[in-house]
Image (spheres, rainbow, N blue to C red):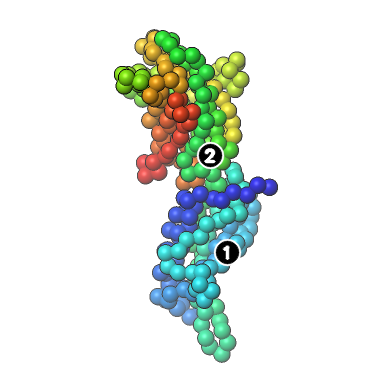
Amino acid sequence: MRKYHINKFIVLALTAVLSAFMTSPVPAVGEASGVRPDGVEFYRKAKGESDYQKIKVLDAEKGRFDQGKTYEDASVTPGEIYSYKVRTYKRFLGFLWKTDYSSFSEEVEIPACNFAGKYEVKAISAPGAVSEFVVQVTSDEYNGILTLKSLQEEAAPVYSAADEDQTCDEQAVTLSGYSLNNKDWAKIPEAGLEILAGQSCYLKFTFTKGTGLFRGDTGTYSDVYMEEGAEYQGSAGFGSTLFTIHLTEGTAEAFSDYDN
């Protein structure tokens, strides 16, 4: 089973939980409050599992625990969805050493996938004046799910290109179809086309004004922008997504604004 270092969002998510708990009271026996913890325990379970397992202990005495530190889970499997929770502890000296524990934090559910989607792309259609063009898109094996919808008018995607003389043009296009083999074509489902991790598919874009100038992978740049109609489920969940195809570079990315 291949292991995958979980990306930076998981570090940030766990840091947020951890930071709150490191300055929280430890509501244990005797209702001790306002006590700086001696350490923190991390618990994790995969989706479908019923029980949490303790996966990490950071302890101040061993020099591994301090406020502001983070923990990166390096033992996850790509594509799995994990839930995390933490609790802090404090040691007290009475007749014997005693350890009191805080309550558990709220659960944080995080998919083990890229924070932003990464893709390889290829212009299938030749450059020229055409009514439509085809682009092959291959999703990175560590991506989350990208959902694309067919939108028109103000929300339609934009094809933007420039030649070596910096002559630029922008033209509205519609995501009009898809294929898994570049032979059998179908309309984009109303609920959207899902592109899964490691999957390759072909996207057909149609110029909304009938005919447009497609530059393929030539020129200074040749891009397709989808500011609406795209939704990427990364390690931070769903968010308003900008899906950008760079044909001259052979790459694409799906970046979500998780504040919207």
Choose top left, top right, bottom left or bottom right for residue 15: bottom left
Residue beneath the point at 55% across and 30% down: 138
Asked whether 83 or 252 is in front, the reply is 252
**Residue density around tag 2, few if under 14, some if 14–19, many if 20 or more, within 10 Å:** many
Name the residue: 60% across, 51% down: 76
Residue 144 shows which numbered tag? 2
Residue 152 in view here: no
Q: Report if residue 154 is visible in the image.
A: yes
Q: Residue type at mark 1?
A: Lys
In the displayed structure, does residue 227 sit left or right of residue 180? left
Residue at 45% x, 21% y is: 217
Left of 204 or right of it: where is 169?
Answer: left
Residue 19 % position (x, y): 42, 63
Dividing the picture into quadrants, the one containing residue 152 is top left
Label 1 crowd bin: few (<14), some (14–19), many (20+), radius 10 Å = some
Residue that mark 1 sits on: 56
Q: Position of residue 158 (x, y in %)?
A: 37, 23
